[in-house]
Image: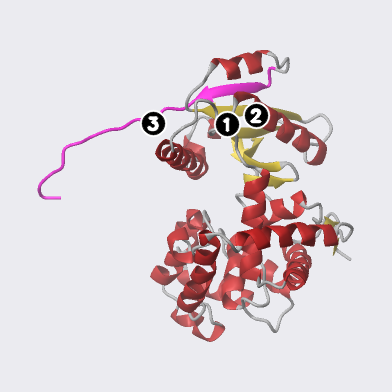
């Protein structure tokens, strides 16, 4: 067998998710999410029907990639230009993906190999929309959730992306059945679990709600900007974002059992790794502690003997506590950079 689910602890995982589900049903955002499911399926299920793929337009496909339309997944739009460069090839890849006469593992691998940018996250999201009762979503959030619950399957070396997804999808379906919920709701629960596990501690003095939301949007913008424009940044000169078969951007919010790494990269020439952590509204000690946990995880699970692992904290504001914390770390392979956002104005030509 190419992959075997870790079933020890399955019942405990179900109970934790069930408790989260019970509490979530009292919240307005939960109700809104269930309503969004029906809206999204009504809009996009028809365009991903195998018999109608020949009519799939670039406009319809691109619209699905944005969170304001799919209501569930962020980041899918980053590969929009690459995905839609050849619409005929995209339609063919989706036709293979949605062809249930083939085995899931085979068509998943085949579809991903046909067009660059069609990674596991987008492919499984499309499967869920097309067949909401049969397929769960495998992305960095759900993978992180499975690792947090310690039920991530053990895969043999050489297991393909499609073979992994077939095993994971069976696990998603088992969990959904045990919880008495659908796969869309299960996907929402992964997000809830990861948010709880990675909950941030706001520094004192506390920010106002408005300021906190503005900072969150700024940090998210920086995160997306770094990933989208990686090769144009100074980091991109020496480092490349970590990739895996079937997932070129695997290093974006890379899932571990101790949280998600903001950006995981590998050196282009030397045997070295880089863990990038964006400092959000959390205490300096927490930021450094989280970075050190990620470095330790990479050393144990990814780095080969002799490979170095570096850490980088990127922050908008650098307070003394963080500087002192870094002074206390003897390993000089951890560095700190400050980012600044510049605002420019330019004249507008009346003829534009």
Magenta segment? 332-352
What's the coloring here?
secondary structure
| Mark in front: 1 vs 3 | 1
Q: Earlier in the sequence, mark 1 or mark 3?
A: 1
Q: Determine contact: label 2, label 3, CB under 8 Å.
A: no
Q: Which residue is mark 3?
A: 341
Residue 101: image location, x then y, percent = 70, 84
Closest to the observer: 87 or 1?
1
Determine which quarter of the picture holds residue 69: bottom left
Alpha carbons under labels 1 and 2: distance apart:
7 Å
* Residue 335 magenta: yes
| Mark in front: 2 vs 3 | 2
Is there any visible trace of residue 137 in the rendered image? no
Q: Residues within 10 Å of mark 3 (few under 14, many from 20)?
A: few
Q: Which residue is mark 2?
A: 286
Residue at x 70% of width, y 51% of height: 144
Alpha carbons under labels 1 and 3: distance apart:
20 Å
Q: Which residue is mark 1?
A: 282
Q: Secondary structure at mark 3?
A: loop
Does 341 appear above or below 333? below
């Amino acid at each position: 067998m190419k992959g075997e689910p870790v079933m020890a602890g399955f019942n405990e995982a179900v109970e934790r998710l069930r408790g989260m589900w019970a509490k979530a049903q009292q919240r307005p955002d939960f109700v809104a999410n269930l309503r969004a499911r029906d809206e999204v399926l009504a809009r996009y299920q028809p365009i991903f029907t195998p018999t109608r793929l020949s009519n799939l337009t670039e406009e319809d496909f691109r619209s699905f990639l944005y969170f304001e339309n799919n209501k569930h997944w962020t980041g899918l739009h980053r590969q929009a230009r690459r995905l839609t460069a050849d619409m005929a090839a995209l339609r063919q890849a989706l036709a293979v993906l949605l062809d249930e006469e083939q085995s899931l593992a085979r068509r998943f691998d085949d579809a991903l190999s046909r067009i660059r940018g069609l990674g596991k996250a987008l492919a499984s999201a499309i499967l869920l929309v097309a067949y909401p009762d049969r397929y769960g979503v495998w992305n960095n959030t759900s993978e992180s959730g499975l690792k947090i619950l310690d039920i991530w399957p053990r895969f043999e070396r050489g297991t393909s992306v499609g073979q992994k997804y077939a095993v994971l999808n069976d696990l998603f379906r088992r969990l959904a059945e045990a919880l008495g919920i659908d796969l869309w709701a299960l996907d929402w629960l992964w997000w809830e679990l990861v948010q709880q596990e990675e909950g941030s501690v706001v520094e004192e003095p506390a920010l106002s709600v408005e300021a906190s939301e503005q900072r969150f949007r700024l940090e998210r913008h920086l995160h997306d900007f770094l990933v989208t424009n990686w090769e144009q940044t100074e980091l991109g000169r020496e480092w490349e974002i970590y990739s895996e078969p079937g997932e070129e951007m695997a290093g974006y919010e890379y899932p571990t059992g101790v949280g998600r790494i903001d950006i995981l990269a590998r050196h282009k020439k030397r045997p070295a790794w880089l863990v990038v952590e964006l400092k959000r509204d959390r205490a300096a000690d927490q930021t450094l502690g989280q970075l050190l946990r990620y470095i330790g995880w990479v050393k144990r699970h990814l780095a080969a003997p002799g490979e170095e692992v570096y850490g980088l904290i990127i922050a908008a504001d650098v307070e003394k506590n963080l500087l002192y914390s870094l002074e206390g770390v003897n390993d000089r392979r951890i560095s700190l950079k400050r980012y600044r956002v510049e605002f420019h104005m330019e004249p507008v030509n009346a003829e534009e």
